Image (cartoon, rainbow, N blue to C red):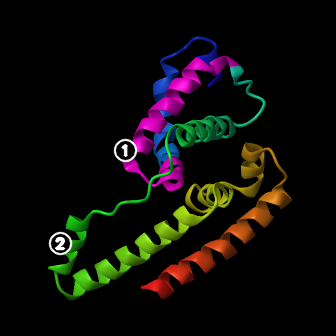
């Protein structure tokens, strides 16, 4: 990123190749919409170029990138009301038509859908720490830098988020 900041804009392609999947995963788990996540990845990389002068190189590039991504999420939330997660019924119909293996696949798909639904019901603060720690596999130290807090505070948030996620998941399961 320091090379991009110095004017070598061709290096932006390398950064995109290295980080766009990771960034997409974070944004997708935060908003639950593939199309919106793809758009937000593009916005984050656009902002990297626009605000490249703010990257100092003192901290990790990923930390700066996640700060930009969090700001894009905040902007999206301000523009739109939070939408619910939609599932493709055609996908389920194909699985139902299949047989025993399809039953197992459908069951796993339903469990995943329940987990995604529970994750969507978490507060943004809790969902964010779970996505960063479990899906993005960032270390607590790195998450602390991204969130501008202490590592201990991140551990507490993750524990509370997992407890809340479990409670929501079980309540959704019970409703079925």
Task: Using the rendered image of the protein, determine whether residue 35 is visible from the camera's viewpoint.
Answer: yes
Of the image marks 2 and 1, the number of the one nearer the N terminus: 1
What's the residue at 54%, 78% (across, down)?
169
Q: Is residue 50 left or right of residue 94?
A: right
Foreground pick, 145 / 157? 157
Q: Quadrant of the N terminus?
A: top right
What's the residue at 45%, 53% (across, down)?
83
Residue that protrudes farthest toward the top in the picture? 7
Query: In whole angstroms, how far apart are the C-alphas of marks 2 and 1?
Result: 23 Å
Residue that label 2 marks: 94
Q: Position of residue 68 (x, y in %)?
A: 62, 34
Q: Which mark is residue 148?
A: none
Foreground pick, 28 / 25? 28
Q: Is residue 111 left or right of residue 148?
A: left
Q: Position of residue 23 (x, y in %)?
A: 52, 44
Instruction: Confirm or deny contact between disc 2 and disc 1 (CB under 8 A).
Output: no
Q: Is residue 155 left or right of residue 109?
A: right
Foreground pick, 123 / 9? 123
Q: Is residue 143 magenta?
A: no
Please give the count of numbered marks on the rendered protein. Answer: 2
Density class for disc 1 (Cα within 10 Å; few <14, some 14-19, many ≥20) is few
Q: Is residue 2 above or below residue 93?
A: above
What's drawn in magenta, residue-wise? 25-53
Density class for disc 2 (Cα within 10 Å; few <14, some 14-19, many ≥20) is few
Q: Is residue 67 left or right of residue 16?
A: right
What's the residue at 24%, 67% (across, down)?
89
Q: Is residue 86 above or below residue 51?
A: below
Q: Quadrant of the C terminus?
A: bottom left
Residue that label 1 marks: 35
Q: Position of residue 16 (x, y in %)?
A: 47, 33
């Amino acid at each position: 990123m320091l090379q991009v900041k110095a004017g070598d804009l061709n290096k932006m392609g390398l950064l995109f190749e290295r980080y766009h999947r990771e960034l997409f995963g974070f944004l997708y788990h935060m908003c639950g919409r593939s199309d919106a996540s793809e758009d937000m990845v593009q916005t984050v990389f656009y902002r990297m170029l626009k605000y490249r002068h703010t990257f100092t190189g003192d901290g990790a590039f990923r930390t700066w990138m996640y700060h930009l991504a969090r700001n894009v999420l905040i902007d999206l939330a301000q523009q739109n009301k939070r939408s619910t997660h939609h599932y493709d019924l055609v996908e389920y119909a194909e699985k139902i038509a299949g047989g025993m293996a399809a039953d197992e696949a459908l069951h796993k798909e339903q469990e995943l859908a329940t987990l995604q639904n529970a994750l969507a019901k978490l507060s943004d603060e809790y969902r964010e720490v779970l996505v960063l720690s479990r899906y993005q596999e960032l270390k607590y130290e790195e998450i602390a830098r991204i969130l501008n807090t202490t590592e201990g505070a991140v551990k507490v948030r993750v524990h509370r988020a997992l407890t809340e996620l479990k409670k929501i998941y079980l309540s959704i399961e019970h409703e079925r």
